[in-house]
Image (spheres, rainbow, N blue to C red):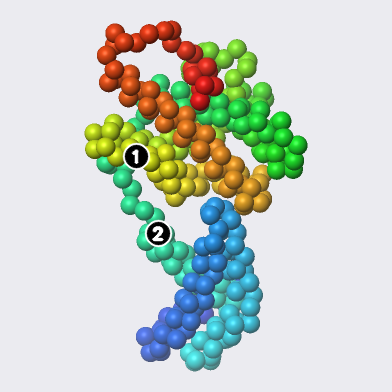
Amino acid sequence: MVTPGNTAKNTAAAILQIWGTINPTVFITSLCIELWSVIVTGEKSVLSSAANEAMFSAYHKFCTSERYHTLWKTLMSDICKIEPCFILHKFVTKKVLEGILQKKHSADVPISHDTDTNVDMTKAEEQVLRYIAGYIPHALLRRYQKQNNKIAELYVSFLKQWKVSSANSTHETFLQYTKGWIEAVNRGGLFVVTDDVYLFFRAVEKVVRRTANFQQFRYGKLTGIKDTIIGNLESDVKVNLYWCKLASESISNEKASIALLETVLTYFVHLRCRAFADAYVLVTKPRNSEKGEKKSLRKSLSKN
């Protein structure tokens, strides 16, 4: 039975039988050059979702262009006049694209320094982080709800999606352990975030911990630490991916998405640096110098 799949299979077998007798250098070089042009189309985009959209748009244009079909027709004509097989052409082109992307990704991704600094978090720390993850969108919602413009309306609509709906409030997930403390103290007014939002903030927290820690104090490397943290966050692959997962379907404008991302990161880093400074003072200051009552976590955050 003749089917497109069988035709592609038979064509591939015929090509492999004579592959060693031909010189496909020109074809391979031309195809790789074209695909590299496709890949770098997304280089100007900051967010991975926008970069992927630009790249796959360019890939579709290339695969439907005259030069693409000419490139393959020339190869097939050179090897024993084999008829073009468009399904095979697309399959091979896609595999070459994936191979180049894999090589590029391994070269572009910065070397992880996770082993240099312990970034493991205890259950208690993850529960506190989940509270912080809810405080930030709660505070930003109040800010944007006071503004009267389309961008603010977009942000309000987007940030409201971060909150667990009443319909899903009893739904258990593998991250249920991070909700323990919030569920114990919540009287109905807390902003309880979804798991995807929490995972984004956990990725952010791990970058912060690798950048700002007591080892930095010992080496005197805390000058400009805020800018360093922000820079590390903006270049972190996981932070970028988690943000795109949250925002890609709700905020189509890349500039608006980046602006909100920077606001969220700046807010978080401000809170963490203040908490880090307070922790340093607490462990270095004599205990008998501590005065006054301890403030609640919510009041402490509001102060920042």
Element type where label 2 sits in the image = helix
Q: Position of residue 249 (x, y in %)?
A: 65, 46
Q: Is residue 285 left or right of residue 72?
A: left
Q: Is residue 53 left or right of residue 19?
A: right
Q: Position of residue 86 (x, y in %)?
A: 59, 77
Number of the front mark, 2 or 1:
1
Residue at 26% in and 37% down: 220
- The disc, 2 or 1, on the residue closer to the chain's N-terminal end is 2
Q: Is residue 108 left or right of residue 247?
A: left
Q: Number of labelled discs?
A: 2
Q: Is residue 291 visible?
A: yes
Up-down: is 301 above or below 218? above
Q: How far, Cα to Cα, is label 2 from label 1? A: 28 Å
Q: Is residue 179 left or right of residue 279?
A: right
Q: Is residue 193 visible?
A: no
Of 160 and 164, nearer the camera is: 160
Up-down: is 83 above or below 186? below
Q: Which residue is mark 2?
A: 108
The reply to whether callout 2 and callout 1 are in contact (CB within 8 Å) is no
Of 242 and 302, nearer the camera is: 302
Element type where label 1 sits in the image = loop
Q: Position of residue 261 (x, y in %)?
A: 56, 43
Q: Could you tell me the amino acid type at mark 2?
A: Asp
Residue at 51% in and 43% down: 242
Q: Could you tell me the amino acid type at mark 1?
A: Thr
Few, some or many C-alpha atoms within 10 Å of disc 1 (few <14, some 14-19, many ≥20)? few
Q: Position of residue 196 (x, y in %)?
A: 54, 36
